[in-house]
Image (tube, rainbow, N blue to C red):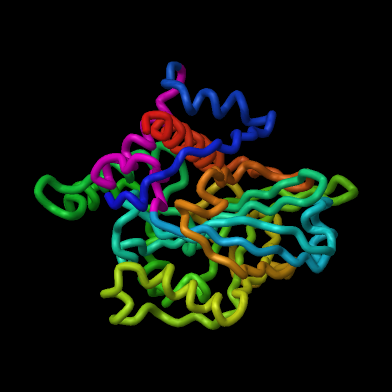
Amino acid sequence: MKKSLSLKKRHYLPLVLAAGVITGLAAWLLPSLYSSSPTAVQIVDEMEAVSGGAHPGFRRNHAKGQCISGHFESNGNAVEISHASLLQRGSVPLIGRLSAAGGDPSQADVHGMIRSMALRLADADGQTWYMAMNSVPVFPVNTPEGLYAQLRASMPEYGGSGPDPQKMQAFKNTHPEMRPFETWLAAHPEASGFDNSTFYSVNAFRMTDAQGRVHFVRWSMVPETPYKPMTSGQSRDPDFLAYGFATLLEQAPVRWHLLITLAEPGDVTTDATVRWPDGRRQIDAGTLVIDNQQSQVEGACRDVDFNPLELPAGIGPSDDPLLLAREAAYAESHRRRVEEEGTH
């Protein structure tokens, strides 16, 4: 690992946990005594193993990335479904991170077939909204147990560079819910850059309006830049994502639109492998404007744990079991990074 990649001494932002999930998160972080569900420790252990071991100081998934900053311009259109102050008309600053899937911070970009956008929006009153979005609208599995099994099946084959085909096929045979994920990947080649990638919340959330009515939603960040597939030349460039985005920012800010999709009665809100039918109502809630990019080692995002359950008043989690598992895994990854920093 190059010295420039190592994390420097700094203070880590505290994990702020919603009161309603503290008990559940503690159960995830500690060894499981009462449940067969995998703990966050076990899941993060498997993430490390799939990546060839731990890479001290880096996130256990989406390890390669860069910090971004800018602001969100809310147009106020979403106030009909949420009283969240961050959705009121106006502009709020943000910091975020763009990354590619995988636990190795030095991997070539072509190997990170799933890209991620993480954001922290914060207003003057202290309300914050953390988003952790992927470039695929569905998750491959719908339970923590399925996630753990998928990681186990993804372990590199001894002496090889990828998983054991027989183990992976056995996993797929027992987890047919993975098919929509694979179908999507096959039909949507990777984009040529972060700027023309759409990012999805994947999980469903609750939004509560001023009258107390609950609306189940998913959201996406849809780019103003038209989609283009990755070129063969880019596939040979190990760092084309960061360099390409930096080049664009030298010319002008890059923009996405926050589209909030509303569920209809009968739509599944507890299974991240199931997409809602086309034609659901969408609200364009405003514009995400990114005007700066920084190294993840030196940028403002390096200490931020983008837990998807840190939400403002007016937005809450659904009962999707993967949400609590995601939060716990993020917290465990963050805990390890803090401990590794203390050894340097």
Q: Is residue 77 left or right of residue 121?
A: right
In the image, is residue 120 above or below residue 291? above
Residue 245 lies within the magenta run: no
**Residue beneath the point at 42% across and 21% down:** 31
In the image, is residue 256 above or below residue 140? below
Q: Position of residue 319 (x, y in %)?
A: 61, 40
Main SS class of the magenta portion in the image: loop
**Residue beneath the point at 71% across and 47% down:** 128
Q: Is residue 116 something that shows in the picture?
A: no
In the image, is residue 106 above or below residue 331? below
Q: Is residue 43 left or right of residue 262?
A: left
Q: Nearer the viewer, residue 157 or 171?
A: 157
Q: Position of residue 178 (x, y in %)?
A: 38, 55
Q: Nearer the viewer, residue 225 or 206?
A: 225
Q: Is residue 33 something that shows in the picture?
A: yes
Q: Position of residue 129 (x, y in %)?
A: 68, 49
Q: Quadrant of residue 133?
A: bottom right
Q: Is residue 146 left or right of residue 237?
A: right
In this figure, what is the number of numbered marks?
0
**Which residue, as the protein is rendered here, is positioned at the far left?**
159
Q: Is residue 324 left or right of residue 338?
A: right
What's drawn in magenta, residue-wise?
A: 34-63
Q: Quadrant of the C terminus?
A: top left
**Residue beneath the point at 83% across and 48% down:** 213
Q: Nearer the viewer, residue 240 or 88?
A: 240
Q: Position of residue 337 (x, y in %)?
A: 43, 37
In the image, is residue 231 above or below residue 173? below
Q: Nearer the viewer, residue 296 or 213?
A: 296
Q: Quadrant of residue 12?
A: top right
**Residue beneath the point at 55% across and 75% down:** 249
**Which residue, as the protein is rendered here, is positioned at the far top?**
33
Residue 54 lies within the magenta run: yes
